[in-house]
Image (cartoon, rainbow, N blue to C red):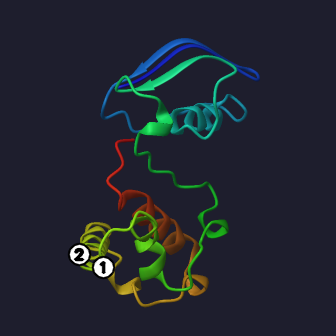
Amino acid sequence: MIELDGIRHHLLAIPWLALDEGTIAVIGANGSGKTTLLELCAGIEVPQRGSVRIDESEPRSCEVGWVCEFPDKNLLFERVRDEIASPLRFTFVDEAGIADRVARICDRLAISPLLERRTAGLSGGEKALVALATALIVHPRV
């Protein structure tokens, strides 16, 4: 569960909000604070007042998957396989484990044919799927 209590952050004010496991969407008008809310929940931003807890822990101590609104701006590696594997390599997972997890997440998202392609040559939708795979490969809690 994600719980926000007494949040004040710039123009955003949330007296109290609890998001149960399985909540998959935040919907609102432009400028209503959706991105700010998600950044607070991910630990990217820290509230000026109040607290954010994920299963009673600070967001920065939890595994949070994040897909940017413009995924093509955040691609770091030339090949899709390396892009998806990068979070595991940054945390020193062994190469056999990396190969297995990359194969499983790509099968799950039906993007295995993209693995040997260059990230620069992908369509916008393909880049979004690669960004999603990169976020999900670490099995984030949120």
From the viewer's perspective, tell me whether residue 54 is left or right of residue 108: right
Query: What type is the residue that disc 1 sits on?
Result: Glu
Please report contact status of discs 1 and 2: CB closer than 8 Å, yes or no. no
Q: Quick check: 73 above or below 121?
A: above
Label located before the other in sequence (1 or 2): 1
Residue placed most toward the observer, 89 or 133: 89
Determine which quarter of the picture holds residue 107.
bottom left
Numbered circle sitting on residue 95: 1
- Circle 2 crowding by C-alpha within 10 Å: few under 14, some 14–19, many from 20: few
- Circle 1 crowding by C-alpha within 10 Å: few under 14, some 14–19, many from 20: few
The residue singled out by tag 2 in the image is 100
Q: Quick check: 82 above or below 140?
A: below
Q: For the N terminus, which image quadrant? A: top left
Determine which quarter of the picture holds residue 119.
bottom right
Query: What type is the residue that disc 2 sits on?
Result: Asp
Q: For the C terminus, which image quadrant? A: top left
Determine which quarter of the picture holds residue 36.
top right
Residue placed most toward the observer, 131 or 77: 77
The residue sitting at 58% across, 87% down in the picture is 121
User: What element does badge 2 sit on?
Assistant: helix
